[in-house]
Structure formats: C-alpha cells, structure tokens
Image (cartoon, rainbow, N blue to C red):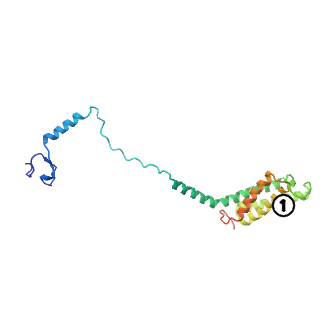
Amino acid sequence: MSNGSHQPAGWAGGRGRGWAGGRFRSPVGDREEQILGEAAAPEHAPPAEVPAAPAAPAPPVATVRGWRAVAERAGDVLAEWAPTGGRILLGLVLLWFGYHELLLPGEWTGYVPWINEASNLAIIAVLAHGWVLLVLAAALVAGIAPRVSAAIASVVLLEIVISLSVSGLSSDSMRDVGVLGLAICLTGCRNQRLVLRD
C-alpha cells in the first residue's frame, strides 16, 4: 500500500473513486511499453505534428443570390439616374447643332423647307432655329423645367424629322427619329435628378 490509501502499489487511475475506478498498472510495464514504442518507431520518424495555425477565413464566394442583389441594386441606380443622363445627353446634342447653326448658318440653309436656300430668309430661319436649340440645350443640361423643355424639344425635333423626310428617308432622318424618341420619353419622366427648377 502506498500513501496510506487502500490501493495496492502500482495501482493507477483511481483518482479518488476507490480501487474499482481504475486498472492495475505495473511500474515495470510502463517502462516496457516506452522501450517497445521507441523500438517500433522508425529511425527517421517525422517530427511531431505541430498544430497548424488557424487558417484565415476564405473570402466569401459570390452566390447567385449575391449577384442578383448586386444586379438589382445597379438596376435601381440606373433607373434612378437614366432620365437625368438622357436629359443631359439630349441637351448636348441640341447644343452641338444649335452652336453649328449659329456659327455657320449658310451651311444649314439647305435643310430649310419651302424657302430658297440662297435667300436671306433661309439664313434668318437657321439662326432662329439655332437660338431655339441653344436655349433648349441650356434648359435641359441645367435642369430648368426639364419636362417642359423636353416637350418643346420634341416639337422642334418632330419638325426636323418631317422636313428631312420630305426628301426621303436617310440616315440623318432616322438618327433624328431616335433623338425625337428620347425627347418624348423625357417628357413623361417625373423622376429627374440634378434639377435647378421643376
């Protein structure tokens, strides 16, 4: 007996549960197991494995649901800003044509219907048309009464399309049909951003 307990020498594993809680171990048996374990181990045993540091979390993988959410958000932003972008681009187109009609009116007199292109009346008509386009362009770009400006631009562009179509359909008239369509769409858009005055 050891240490005044009721367990025989070499008894291990009781740990306060009495002699029935463990199993008998011989002090010699422990040494034999250690020697046998070393003999059975290969000469060049790999070093004991050190527990690896926890790996950094993998970046989140985009799921279909995640891409849908991104696409829906992008669609919402585009839907919110598309009328503004269309309005500014229409204003830039009108600005370009108005500026060139004011700068070189003689080159545009051929587009004036029912008036002799060599007459002063044709030049006056081109200059007046250029000023109308310039004012509409400024109103559209600045966002001053954008729906009214787009409605007036629609009427002016309809006049241009009709006067170009009199001589037959061409790439110019078809381009202006597209610009007319943009102006008509902007006439109905209530959701505008970057507006100075509604």
Looking at the image, which residue sits at the far bottom? 198
Q: In the figure, 138 relative to 37: above or below?
A: below
Q: Looking at the image, which residue sits at the far top? A: 43
Q: Image point 79% across, 51% down: which residue?
A: 171
Residue 47 or residue 6, whichever sits in front: 6
Q: Position of residue 56 (x, y in %)?
A: 41, 48
Question: Does residue 84 lie above or below 6 as drawn?
Answer: below
- Residue 146: name its quadrant: bottom right
Q: Is residue 50 left or right of residue 82?
A: left
* x and y percentages locating residue 80 in the rendered image: 62, 61
Q: Residue at x 73, y 56 (%)?
A: 92
In percent of width and height, residue 132 lies at: 80, 61
Q: Quadrant of the C terminus?
A: bottom right
**Which residue occupies the foreground of this view, 102 or 176?**
176
Question: Which quadrant of the figure has residue 192?
Answer: bottom right
Q: Is residue 79 left or right of residue 183?
A: left
Q: Position of residue 95 (x, y in %)?
A: 76, 56
| Count of all numbered marks drawn on residues in the image | 1
Specify few, some or many for label 1: CA neighbours under 10 Å numbering under 14, 14-19, or 20 or more: some
Residue type at mark 1: give it: Ala
User: Taking 53 as reference, is 41 left or right?
Assistant: left
Under circle 1, the secondary element is helix
Q: Which residue is mark 1?
A: 128
Horizontal side of residue 194 vs 136, given as left or right:
left
- Image point 77% across, 57% down: which residue? 177
Foreground pick, 140 / 169:
169
Q: Nearer the viewer, residue 92 or 81?
A: 81
